[in-house]
Amino acid sequence: MSYSLAELCICAGAEAFRHDGEKMATLIGVVPRLAGGLAKLTFNPGLMMTEGEAYLVSEPVPLGPRGDYQPKIEGLMTYERVFDIVYRGDRHCFVGPVQVDRYGQMNISVIGGTYEQPKVALLGARGFPGNTINNINSMFVPKHNTKAFVDGEVDMVSSVGYNPTRWPDGKKPPYLELRHIITDLCVMDFGGADNAIRVISLHPGVSFDEVQDNTGFPLEKIDGLGDTPAPTEDQLELIRKLDPHNLRATVFEGNPPGDRRA
């Protein structure tokens, strides 16, 4: 059975939501959006998601133009209610940082130079500081290299990670939890010593040495490190329904296969 790298990452990303129960999912980008939808349709039906605006839906809304599709609305998710959920720690954000460091601190703000005169100005910190203090966070990084996984700290610390010197008043935020990182090479988590980033699976055809060579800091790995599980036919069928316009084919240049040994 053939599958694309994007489909492999979607299925791996869905696993980040397996034990969440009734959490609100904030899904930024094609892979996170499809990963959350896949999780809701399979093992976590209690996952809460919106149609992109103010309504909660009972099933994920397909990506792209909707045509005749009508979202299956089951409740209202006002801006005020979103903040109630955020402050209780009842949300899981799946985001796409530009840089990540060994502490899990993310950057979506500026690259290079100084903060006042950066080489590249991006989005600003946006909601990342509060989101990481109060909510679970997972990440999708489509190009795993030393520019994305940097030595030292990220160029601008846009989010809270496992760096005690950056914690407010030196105290760990009560809801701080970094869950999974999905890249084009592997799946990682923060289960190493003192929340160190470790590799928990390698995409088929990728070695641990290749992942380490493309990371700016030392990585740990789980015992018995193996391949990222291939999507099942049932999962692929659901992904096709969630992405009828095949937007997932645009995530990686050339839409490469998920198994590089093929």
Image (cartoon, rainbow, N blue to C red):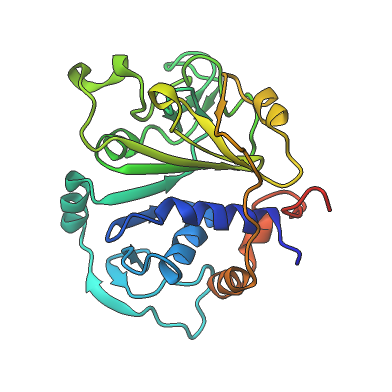
Position of 34 with respect to 185 (left or right) is left
Which residue, as the protein is rendered here, is positioned at the far bottom? 68
User: Residue 90, relative to residue 50: is it above or below?
Assistant: above
What number of labels is visible?
A: 0
Residue drawn at point x = 35 percent, y = 56 percent: 25
Near-viewer residue (92 or 2): 2
Query: Looking at the image, can residue 27 be seen?
Result: no
Position of 174 with respect to 45 (left or right) is left
Residue 116: x and y, percent? 42, 16
Residue drawn at point x = 22 percent, y = 46 percent: 89
Q: Quadrant of residue 64?
A: bottom right
Residue drawn at point x = 40 percent, y = 32 percent: 124
Residue 180: x and y, percent? 46, 42
Near-viewer residue (55 or 226): 226
User: Residue 222, relative to residue 3: is it above or below?
Assistant: above
Residue 20: x and y, percent? 33, 55
Which residue, as the protein is rendered here, is positioned at the far right? 262
User: Residue 105, relative to residue 243: is it above or below?
Assistant: above
Q: Quadrant of residue 169?
A: top left
Near-viewer residue (120 or 152): 152
Residue 253: x and y, percent? 73, 49
Residue drawn at point x = 20 percent, y = 21 percent: 171
Query: Looking at the image, can residue 248 be seen?
Result: yes
Q: Quadrant of the N terminus?
A: bottom right
